Image (cartoon, grey):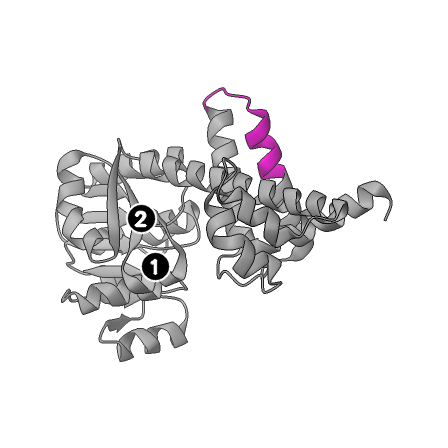
Amino acid sequence: MAFVGLGMMGMPMASRLVAAGFGVRGSDVSQAALATFSASGGIACATPAEAAKDSSVLITMLPNGPVVRDVLMGSGRAADALAPGALVIDMSSSAPLETRRLAEELTAKGLQFVDAPVSGGVKRAEAGTLAIMAGGDHGEIERARPVLEAMGSSIVATGPVGSGHAVKALNNYVSAAGLVAACEAVVVAERFGVDPDVLIDVLNVSTGRNNSTEVKMKPFVLSGSFASGFAMALMAKDLRTAADLSHELGLDLDGLRAAAGLWTAASAELGQKADHMEIHRFVLERSKAEKGG
């Protein structure tokens, strides 16, 4: 098995596969990542093509669809190195319609393809309890299932190829919208003199409860740590993916368009290294600017 992309998420995911007994050849542009993977029992390879050579399964966990395409069909030449009939599983966060086009090209080469992006962050990747959204032919998803089950506790077949990536982007839109709503509510509560901890407690026993109020607000926002481990730039990218998909489908959705714009602006202002929890800082500063300080 080949695994391309040993970053913050890819490393623990590939390591879970090794721990499950799979022989995994890993590839990454980082020499440090390759050394870490080798120390964990994996086989480090200098190039994607070397990792893919004669493999029956190849997993990609890369920044975006264009990088996935380049690894498979471009300079990486990984698709040409695979065994005949091999299964490609793209676990990156890619654009759904681009995914469909890539799947068609891989099918023309005699390969199978499943898009299977994940949700859960680094901690759940380390624990092997990710939520995985799998799009593709039923038989190909079932072929992928034993591999996916080594990395996730919830494997959901979402529909035809590309649907996994669509559902992932839409999930992150809903998640991001809930987080911004909670942050804005905290800003208003504080201005009025309500203890933010009390507000979050009320939300969590009321209809405003969501993942952000239950899991994120107290440990990462109200504490001031802003250290969830998921980058704001990645959240902004996923929201743009969802907004682009809606536009390509001929839809004009105010909330989605506004959310993508807000997160893109926040990422540009706070920088590539900002954690997505720092959206609270952006919301707070913007509220002050609009009031004139």
Magenta-span inclusion, residue 256: yes
Which quadrant is home to the N terminus? bottom left
Q: Is residue 269 above or below residue 250?
A: below
Q: Is residue 284 above or below residue 136?
A: below
- Residue 95 in the image, given as x and y percentages of width and height: 42, 39
Q: Which residues are magenta?
A: 249-261
Answer yes or no: is residue 209 visible. yes
24 or 146: nearer the viewer: 146
Q: Name which residue type carries label 2.
A: Ala
Which element type, helix, strand or loop, lies under badge 1? helix
Relative horizontal placement of residue 214, taking residue 274 as reference (left or right): left
- Residue 35 in the image, given as x and y percentages of width and height: 33, 78
3D distance between C-alphas at marks 1 and 2: 9 Å
Whichever of labels 1 and 2 marks the residue nearer the N terminus, that label is 1
101 or 193: nearer the viewer: 193
User: How many residues crowd around disc 1 within 10 Å: few (fewer than 14), some, or many (20 or more)?
Assistant: some
Q: Are marks 1 and 2 in contact (CB under 8 Å)?
A: yes
Q: Name which residue type carries label 1.
A: Arg
Circle on res. 131 = 2
Which residue reaches farthest right?
292
Residue at image location 54% in from the left, 49% down from the top? 201
Relative horizontal placement of residue 139, taking residue 291 as reference (left or right): left
Circle on res. 124 = 1
